[in-house]
Amino acid sequence: MENRDVIECINGSIIHHGKDSNRIYLMEKNDDTIKNITDELEILANIKEYEKIILKCEEKDREYCLENGYIEEAEIPRFFNGKNKCYIMSKFINKKREASSQLEQIIEVLFKAKAKPLIDAKQMEKGYDIRILKEEHIEKMTKIYGEVFASYPFPIYDSKYILKTMQENIIYFGVFYKSELAGIASCEISSKYNNAEMTDFAILNKHRGKGLAKAMLKEMEDEMIRRDIKTLYTIARAISLAMNCTFSESGYLFGGTLINNTQISGGIESMNVWYKNL
């Protein structure tokens, strides 16, 4: 699977960008002022002809972003070290990208997800168990990701990427049926801000409909609690009823919708932000 988007460090800030998602995502800024960083992002966007810039900022930088063409698409309370709120700000360089052709479907999915009652993760069927994945599982992981996703914003099909992130800041979880790996998910931990993104959920077709994603999410939460992580969040496909319900039923709150944000499964899709403060 080809993935042309890249993650790189620009003057101390971690940037994800490329033509697949046709945008720049400031994943983690350095300690410089927001102005210096946004100036750099604007230059890169002009050179590469990207359509959107997205970043996370604190309250002190929100007004500057608004004054310089950004709009607020989502919020995550207590995102920064369990204290300060995060504002997800976006600048649409191509104004056509601001409008989603799937808006009615997005609203319908969100309405149904929000209406779901809280449900504890049920005990899994006999034969299933959840474990933290290790290096010896990487080959099976990349095969599952390749089967579930036609394309993905991050190079999860690349065993070197999986190994590198596994050694650095991502904990991968797997649900097994007997000896077979049936599904995967991950916690991407920010030690700088003491939060974690619950992401990369992939369940093989023949094991779907059994509540495995919700069971993995509960196991992942328990591990994050043991590590004293303060805030959990996800950025889920806005048209995926199953994933939005998984988080809503697990006590996550809706933070906003990122319009035409991420290239996944062959097209650029809008994404919903869900969060839980621990």
Image: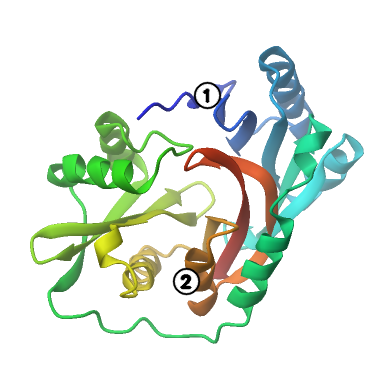
Q: Amino acid at mark 2?
A: Thr
Judging by the rendered image, the residue that carries numbered circle 1 is: 9
254 in relation to 22, above or below: below
The residue depicted at 26 percent of the width and 47 percent of the height is: 144
Residue 165 lies, in percent from the top left, at 33, 39
- Looking at the picture, tell me which residue is in the foreground, 163 or 117: 117
Tell me the quarter of the image containing the N terminus: top left
Residue appearing at x 69%, y 53% in the figure: 102
Where is mark 2, residue-wise?
A: 246
Q: Which mark is residue 102?
A: none
Q: Residue furthest right?
A: 67
User: Neighbour class for label 2 at 10 Å: few (<14), some, many (≥20)?
Assistant: many
Circles 1 and 2 in contact, beta carbons < 8 Å? no
Res 278 visible: no
Badge 2 marks a residue whose secondary structure is helix
Asked whether residue 149 appears in the rendered view, the answer is: yes
Tag 2 or tag 1, which sits nearer the N-term?
1
Residue 47, relative to residue 85: is it above or below?
above
Lateral position of residue 12 relative to residue 132, left or right? right
| x then y, percent, for residue 142 | 26, 40
Disc 1 versus disc 2: distance between alpha carbons?
Answer: 33 Å
Nearer to us: label 1 or label 2: 2
Between residue 11 and residue 152, name the one nearer to us. Answer: 152
Quarter of image, res 77: bottom right
